[in-house]
Image (cartoon, rainbow, N blue to C red):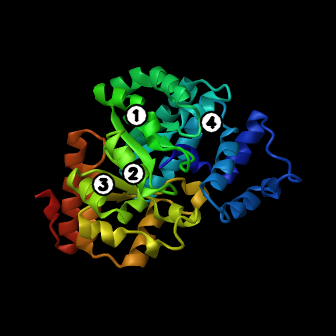
């Protein structure tokens, strides 16, 4: 999920007031009359770009490290209440540096919240830096250079690619991803959300990604789907986001069953939960309501999520053990994929 996507309307208005940020006047956009009005507008997104318009306005309220910390901490509290024990979260430094906020300000705030989540909840976290694909590639290269020490030193877990998809093929970032691979930096990219399945192929072949974010168009290419399954590239699905942004009309249209049958590893995620009306547990429930999955199928999905995570092997082992204990204790089902 994207930490900036956890910015609730209430927190947005609070931070804007505290930091003296002028939100759009109501005569230009009635949605900014109140937090409730804004939340209502979020229910009527027409596309990814329509969402991103509000997403970037919301970011304007984030100025100080404490703002970023408060944002992330609110998310981690909610995730903890949903039963999350490990979270891998994106953030968009270019969205902040482009408006004069130092990269370190955002990173320091988010890092403090991550440490707090671990100390108070035992929740481990990974921060993943994303490049904004609607901005020039050269800007991403500068961001990569500024963050490379943090990427190499472990403060950041890897890189990703997000923002507007149509018209921005992932192969344009090949040089950065090639350098990241040479440096041992983990790599993922948004592909096949609104964009064509060819973007997924580019992400796999040109960026050599280890994960694909969204990736729902993968089901349109049987050969590529087999390749992704054989390479064990995990797809991070975001069901309620796909519905809210009208990539599909309902969760039932998502290729959940097709991925299971084809052996594609995937996880269930919340994307930008404050904007899309659902946190991670809501997404799990929506998938269950749509597909009536068995306990064994859910164990397979969660197992893949753990194996495909970027946390340390010792943490993976611990989580797989907890999954196995839960499966045996409550359902009498062994986590066979972990045998």
User: Gap between marks 2 and 4, in whole Å?
Assistant: 35 Å
Label 2 with label 3: CB-CB less than 8 Å: no
Q: Earlier in the sequence, mark 2 or mark 1?
A: 1
Position of residue 224 measured from the top left corner of the image (x, y, whole percent): 30, 57
Quadrant where the C terminus is found in the figure: bottom left
User: Gap between marks 2 and 3, in whole Å?
Assistant: 19 Å
Q: Earlier in the sequence, mark 2 or mark 3?
A: 2
Label 3 with label 1: CB-CB less than 8 Å: no
Please identify, in this view, whether the residue under mark 3 or under mark 1 is nearer the observer.
1
Comparing 20 with 25, the one in front is: 25
Mark 1 Cα within 10 Å, few/some/many (few <14, many 20+)?
Answer: some
Residue 305: assigned label: 3
Please identify, in this view, whether the residue under mark 2 or under mark 3 is nearer the observer.
2
User: Gap between marks 2 and 1, in whole Å?
Assistant: 13 Å
* Dot 3: element: helix
- Residue at image point 67% right, 25% down: 100
User: Gap between marks 4 and 3, in whole Å?
Assistant: 30 Å
């Amino acid at each position: 999920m994207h930490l900036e996507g956890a910015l609730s309307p209430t927190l947005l208005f609070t931070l804007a007031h505290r930091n003296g940020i002028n939100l759009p006047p109501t005569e230009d956009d009635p949605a900014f009359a109140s937090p409730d009005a804004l939340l209502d507008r979020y229910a009527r997104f027409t596309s990814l770009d329509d969402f991103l318009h509000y997403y970037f306005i919301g970011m304007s309220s984030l100025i100080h490290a404490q703002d970023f910390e408060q944002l992330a901490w609110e998310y981690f509290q909610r995730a903890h209440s949903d039963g999350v024990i490990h979270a891998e979260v994106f953030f968009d430094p270019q969205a902040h540096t482009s408006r004069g906020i130092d990269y370190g300000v955002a990173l320091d705030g988010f890092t403090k919240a991550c440490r707090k989540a671990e100390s108070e909840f035992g929740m481990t976290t990974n921060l993943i830096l994303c490049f904004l694909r609607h901005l020039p590639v050269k800007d991403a290269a500068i961001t990569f250079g500024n963050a490379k020490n943090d990427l190499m030193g472990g403060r950041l877990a890897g890189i990703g690619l997000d923002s507007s998809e149509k018209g921005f093929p992932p192969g344009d970032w090949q040089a950065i991803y090639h350098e990241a691979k040479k440096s041992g930096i983990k790599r993922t990219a948004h592909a096949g959300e609104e964009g064509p399945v060819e973007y997924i192929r580019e992400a796999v072949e040109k960026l050599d990604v280890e994960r694909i974010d969204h990736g729902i168009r993968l089901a349109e290419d049987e050969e590529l789907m087999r390749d992704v399954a054989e390479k064990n590239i995990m797809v991070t699905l975001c069901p309620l986001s796909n519905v809210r942004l009208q990539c599909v009309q309902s969760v039932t249209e998502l290729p959940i069953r097709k991925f299971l049958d084809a052996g594609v590893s995937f996880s269930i995620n919340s994307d930008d939960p404050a904007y899309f009306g659902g946190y991670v547990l809501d997404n799990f429930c929506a998938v269950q309501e749509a597909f009536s999955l068995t306990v064994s199928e859910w164990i397979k999905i969660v197992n893949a999520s753990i194996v495909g995570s970027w946390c340390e092997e010792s943490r993976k082992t611990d989580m797989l053990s907890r999954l196995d204990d839960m499966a045996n204790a409550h359902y009498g089902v062994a986590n066979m994929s972990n045998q």
